Amino acid sequence: MYFIMEEDKRIKNRIKFRDIESGSYVEIEPEEIPQVQDITVLFMLGDEDSIYPDVIETPVFLISDQLKKLIEPYDPEVIYRRVVMNQVKQRKQKTYWILLGERVDCLDKTSEMYPNGWSKRIVFNKEKIGTRRIFRTKGILEPKVFVHVDVSESILRREFGGIVFRSIEMK
């Protein structure tokens, strides 16, 4: 069983990027991974009460340092790059990680897409996934990361915030 790991959009006082449009999405292709810097510094806007969720989907898929430490052992094939977020006025600094790596070609033929390429109904072919526990998939445009049930259960047993899981159909 697999789940989509998403940012909880109900968070009202979420931290915002200063120089990047948060509503847009940047896709990093596998061949571009070597060009991604080992450390990227971003500046943030917010106040003392601003929330840093453990998952941020846009402009790139980011996870908190604590979440990375938990999930990293589940799948050694996932590549991470550090992002340091600075909230200068509040003198806050948080470490996040971009999840990178090859996309798994695991969509079943019964999956449905909208005309613009976004997913309508995602269905996985279990044999095509193999032993992967954390991955992105070929064939969808959205910034989605998929996790095995054991990864999602491990996350839910701890005090992470701003994460929602939705189950995926399997064939």
Image (spheres, grey):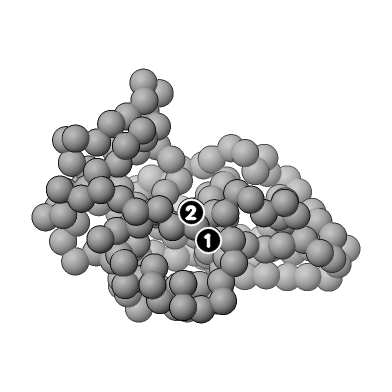
Left or right of residue 46, residue 98 in this image: left
The residue carrying mark 1 is 163
Q: Which mark is residue 56?
A: none
Residue at left offset 42%, top offset 49%: 144
Residue 90's image quarter?
Answer: bottom right
The residue carrying mark 2 is 6
Query: Do the numbered discs 1 and 2 sit on residues whose CB atoms are within 8 Å?
Result: yes
Q: Please, what is the three-letter code of the amino acid marked with disc 2?
A: Glu
Residue at left offset 81%, top offset 56%: 46
Q: Please, what is the three-letter code of the amino acid marked with disc 1?
A: Ile
Who is closer to the viewer here, 69 or 127?
Answer: 127
Residue farthest toward the top in the current orientation of the protein: 115
Left or right of residue 92, residue 37 in this image: left
Residue 126's image quarter?
Answer: bottom left
Residue 134 place in picture, x, y as percent: 33, 63
Q: Secondary structure at mark 2?
A: strand
Left or right of residue 96, residue 133 in this image: left
Q: How many marks?
A: 2
Relative to 28, is 63 above or below? below
* Quadrant of the drawing holding the N terminus: bottom left
Relative to 13, is 94 above or below? below
Does residue 25 appear anywhere in the picture? yes
Label 2 crowd (10 A; few <14 / some 14-19 / many >=20)? many
Residue farthest toward the left in the current orientation of the protein: 127
Residue 99 place in picture, x, y as percent: 44, 60
Mark 1 → mark 2, Cα distance in angstroms: 6 Å
Residue at left offset 76%, top offset 49%: 18
Q: Secondary structure at mark 1?
A: strand
Does residue 96 appear anywhere in the picture? no
